[in-house]
Image (spheres, rainbow, N blue to C red):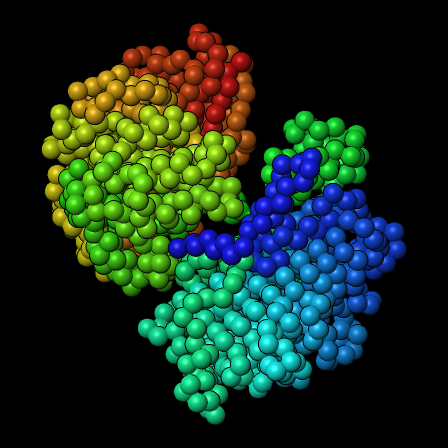
């Protein structure tokens, strides 16, 4: 769960401006979140990798006045002397480097100024010649003075003292945030391999959030001030908010400690994830405290993948303390934190490993190796960087054209209506109060793992209403490495109006936890069961719109709001297996409490796929929020609504839908017993079929990354069906007439397993039944078998672009050259035209005049673009199947525009 803490938010309005002071950037958190950086100042390009001189980073840093430093080069900068940031108001935007990014080597980056923003930068010091021959006293990054400082998505390591410290004996250092950084591999030639020394005085405030500490012997972190300011002279000391960090493989008994005897530190130590490694003593202790004048709040910290029943079990108290001193140390309420976004520790673990460190422009091999160490529980504390291969090569690339050198590429400026020859337009303000330059930097400065193909998913399920939700959840978990699962919410429905059943989800997740590591051997990215349990919620135990309105918030509805509000540009897919009243409540609350523009933005980030209407809140949502992306076959079970719904094509038994054409031998209890239920702990959770098998599965099968569909184009078709955008006419099973278009039932014409042609919306799913059932069977094998014993899908590849143009009468060549199979299986090819998604009129074998694809069963195929049809696009599908057991299929889609 993500919580939003607001502890003192100031709105400042100037005489001629109506903008509140924006954060340093969207997603900035903690005490340093309001840093101005170089906002409104000049732009300085770093154009070479020299240590000093024109075009160097040092020259840019040493200039005065507000300034934003951008890069037109990538690579390693060898520092001959310490690089000091001593003049205030500076932003260093490492994400702008074209290519692989920037790394500083050989000396310390020292920050000693107000209003500093540093993002997406690597600092890896090194020993020997790169450490100037010294074995002590050199941090990778040292923050020594200043206020309003934020480091975001930086990677620091190979230091000869601490990796990254914020330290001052005087009260001239405060309001510091270090977030989403990798603080790793302090070198240990002399036993001084440390993470962070955090010394603060006079009420100094530091936030260390969402960071990874790995392979540091100690000080992960060490808050305090060496007793240089004892409690009787400094009653405030340091306030440290240490939250959502991951700490791995420290040396000895405890990862973090305070060794002071008489100084003051106030500490929030919450929702962190500690994993001892090969250099750690698995003592069950993560923090040792020394000064009885310290106070701390501990909550939600995991140790070795478990949450202790008492949070104080993780703390070692000084043996000389009295019980009164121990009781005074333990706080039952957190201290001030500033604006922070908090996940449960298992969720933080996944997010830090996936998105932390200098991931832009590209995560380098060193960080990739360290993440692998954490996930696989490997790696050691090192003496020298040479033990792990030294500095990865960082290749440069051509920088985008920026004619006026204002930090914004010409093409981006044109799209924003700016003048690429006017450098002054960089400081125009947008609606949020950011300059246009900041808007550009922020557009590339929030890492989103979209390239992985992952979608953000929340499931709303009326599980235990009937068996099919449990069935669908088992299948869902076999594919959950394909999505970022951000919530599993137990809800009500028309069939289960007064209770929810989160307990049943928990049962299935516990079974998943027993097979998750085996699944991971076949494909990476499966979330842990602990993480999935951490995002399990319940809606209100009431039906439909009775649970929507003032005072009707629930953990489920709040989770939806929190997910959409995350600074993540990817939309959130809400998959509705029961009633959607949790979603309705989230939308109602946002509508009532936010501006029209904020509501519009919120709705734009949602995608909904609902399995018919299982309460009255679905029609209300569609009517009230007409711009919401919504996939549904409207209607209730009463009067046959489920019979006519597209999703019934998943199994289409003789109770629901009665849709002939599909192979029913693949969706009966004999098939389930053989292919699912007898395959380990997760299969045991799959119930027998009653009424309909897996009626909810099309919602997530629509998102499976198999090369067939595109979720932003429901009319293209996929394992989850095909839908077209229109206003459906009223039917007797509708609760009320629809008032707006939505993505709803579409028709496919398909030759069925019975040898007859069938036309209907169910066919958009059952036409793929053999493929998706074989795939599920194989995934169930993955839960119990070794990689060598199981089958894995082929990898199709096109020998040309996926979008082709041709004139009528021209030959169009199709190629699957380069397709392969990870198991070495032989491959079969099937090229065919999927007629319904395109705009090009063609017949089928049923109606006559089909498109003839020559050599359609070969790797290389071709056809002649028809002349007697109107121009438009046609969709050609390549299906590549292996000869493994069961046979698995993957696809490529080629769109051909006939001109």
Residue pictured at 75% horizontal, 76% vertical = 128
Question: Is 839 positioned to the left or the right of 175 in the image?
Answer: left
Q: How many marks?
A: 0
Q: Above or below — where is 568 with respect to 7?
A: above
* Residue 213 x, y percent position in the rendering: 55, 69
* Residue 562 x, y percent position in the rendering: 42, 47
Q: Nearer the viewer, residue 102 or 266?
A: 266
Residue 848: quarter of image: top left
Residue 409 visible here: no
Q: Above or below — where is 770 with respect to 741?
A: below
Residue pictured at 67% horizontal, 58% vertical = 148
Residue pictured at 54% horizontal, 84% vertical = 291
Residue pictured at 86% horizontal, 58% vertical = 52
Residue 84 visible here: yes
Where does the N terminus fall, quadrant-wise? Answer: bottom left
* Residue 672 x, y percent position in the rendering: 18, 47
* Extreme residue toward the top, this view: 868
Q: Above or below — where is 380 with respect to 845?
A: below
Residue 209: quarter of image: bottom right
């Amino acid at each position: 769960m993500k919580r939003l803490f607001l502890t003192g938010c100031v709105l400042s309005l100037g005489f001629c401006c109506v903008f509140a002071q924006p954060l340093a950037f969207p997603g900035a958190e903690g005490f340093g979140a309001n840093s101005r950086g170089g906002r409104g100042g000049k732009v300085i390009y770093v154009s070479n990798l020299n240590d000093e001189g024109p075009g160097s980073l040092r020259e840019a840093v040493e200039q005065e006045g507000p300034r934003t430093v951008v890069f037109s080069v990538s690579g390693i900068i060898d520092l001959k002397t310490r690089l000091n940031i001593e003049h205030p108001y500076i932003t260093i935007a490492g994400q702008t480097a074209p290519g692989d990014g920037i790394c500083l080597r050989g000396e310390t980056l020292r920050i000693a100024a107000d209003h500093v923003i540093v993002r997406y930068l690597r600092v890896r010091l090194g020993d020997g010649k790169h450490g100037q021959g010294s074995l002590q006293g050199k941090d990778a990054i040292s923050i020594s003075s200043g206020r309003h400082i934020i480091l975001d998505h930086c990677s620091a390591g190979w230091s000869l003292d601490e990796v990254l410290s914020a330290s001052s004996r005087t009260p001239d250092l405060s309001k510091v945030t270090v977030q989403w950084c990798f603080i790793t591999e302090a070198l240990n030639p002399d036993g001084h391999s440390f993470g962070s020394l955090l010394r603060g005085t006079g009420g100094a405030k530091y936030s260390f959030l969402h960071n990874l500490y790995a392979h540091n012997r100690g000080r992960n972190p060490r808050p305090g001030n060496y007793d240089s300011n004892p409690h009787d002279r400094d009653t405030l000391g340091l306030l440290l908010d240490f939250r959502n960090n991951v700490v791995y493989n420290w040396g000895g008994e405890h990862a973090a400690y305070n060794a002071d005897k008489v100084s003051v530190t106030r500490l929030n130590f919450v929702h962190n994830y500690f994993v001892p490694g090969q250099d750690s003593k698995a003592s069950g202790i993560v923090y040792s405290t020394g000064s009885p004048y310290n106070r701390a709040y501990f909550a939600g910290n995991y140790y070795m993948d478990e949450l202790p029943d008492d949070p104080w079990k993780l703390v070692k108290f000084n043996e000389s303390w009295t019980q009164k001193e121990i009781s005074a140390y333990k706080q039952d309420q957190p201290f001030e934190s500033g604006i922070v976004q908090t996940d449960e520790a298992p969720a933080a673990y996944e997010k830090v490993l996936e998105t932390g460190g200098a991931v832009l422009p590209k995560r380098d091999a060193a960080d990739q190796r360290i993440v692998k160490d954490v996930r696989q529980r490997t790696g050691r504390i090192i003496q020298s960087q040479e033990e792990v291969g030294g500095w990865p090569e960082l290749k440069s690339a051509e920088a985008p054209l920026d004619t006026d050198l204002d930090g914004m590429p010409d093409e981006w400026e044109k799209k924003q209506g700016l003048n690429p020859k006017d450098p002054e337009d960089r400081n125009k303000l947008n609606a949020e109060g950011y300059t246009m330059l900041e808007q550009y930097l922020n557009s590339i400065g929030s890492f989103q793992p979209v390239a992985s193909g992952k979608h953000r998913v929340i499931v709303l399920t009326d599980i235990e209403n009937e068996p099919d939700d449990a069935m669908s959840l088992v299948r869902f978990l076999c594919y959950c490495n394909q999505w970022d699962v951000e919530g599993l919410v137990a809800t009500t429905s028309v069939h289960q109006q007064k209770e929810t059943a989160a307990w049943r989800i928990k049962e299935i997740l516990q079974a998943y936890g027993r097979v998750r590591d085996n699944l991971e051997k076949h494909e990476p990215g499966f979330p842990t069961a602990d993480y999935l349990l951490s995002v399990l919620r319940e809606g209100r135990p009431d039906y439909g719109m009775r649970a929507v309105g003032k005072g009707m918030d629930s953990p489920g509805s709040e989770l939806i709001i929190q997910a959409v509000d995350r600074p993540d540009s990817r939309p959130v897919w809400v998959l509705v297996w029961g009633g959607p009243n949790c979603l309705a409540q989230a939308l109602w609350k946002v509508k009532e409490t936010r501006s029209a523009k904020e509501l519009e933005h919120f709705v734009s980030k949602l995608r909904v796929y609902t399995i018919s209407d299982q309460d009255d809140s679905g029609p209300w949502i569609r009517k009230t929020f007409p711009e919401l992306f919504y996939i549904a076959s409207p209607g209730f079970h009463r009067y046959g609504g489920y019979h006519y719904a597209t999703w019934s094509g998943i199994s289409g038994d003789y109770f629901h839908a009665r849709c002939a054409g599909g192979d029913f031998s693949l969706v009966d209890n004999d098939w389930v017993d053989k292919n699912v239920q007898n395959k380990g702990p997760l299969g045991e959770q799959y119930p027998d079929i009653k009424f309909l098998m897996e009626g909810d599965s099309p919602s997530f099968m629509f998102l499976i990354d198999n090369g067939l569909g595109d979720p932003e184009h429901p009319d293209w078709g996929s394992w989850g069906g095909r839908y077209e955008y229109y206003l459906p006419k009223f039917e007797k099973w509708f609760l009320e007439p629809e008032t707006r278009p939505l993505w709803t039932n579409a028709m496919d014409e398909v030759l069925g397993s019975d040898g007859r042609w069938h036309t209907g919306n169910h066919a958009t799913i059952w036409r793929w039944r053999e493929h998706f059932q074989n795939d599920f069977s194989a995934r169930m094998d993955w839960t119990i078998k070794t990689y060598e014993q199981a089958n894995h899908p082929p990898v199709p590849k096109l020998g040309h672009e996926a979008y082709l143009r041709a004139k009528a009468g021209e030959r169009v060549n199709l190629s699957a050259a380069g397709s392969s199979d990870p198991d070495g299986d032989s491959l079969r090819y099937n090229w065919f035209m999927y007629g319904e998604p395109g705009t090009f009129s063609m017949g089928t074998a049923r109606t006559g005049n089909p498109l003839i694809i020559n050599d359609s069963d070969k790797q290389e195929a071709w056809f002649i673009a028809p002349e007697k049809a109107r121009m438009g696009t046609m969709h050609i599908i390549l299906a590549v199947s292996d000869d493994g057991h069961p046979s698995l299929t993957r696809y490529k889609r080629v769109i051909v525009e006939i001109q």
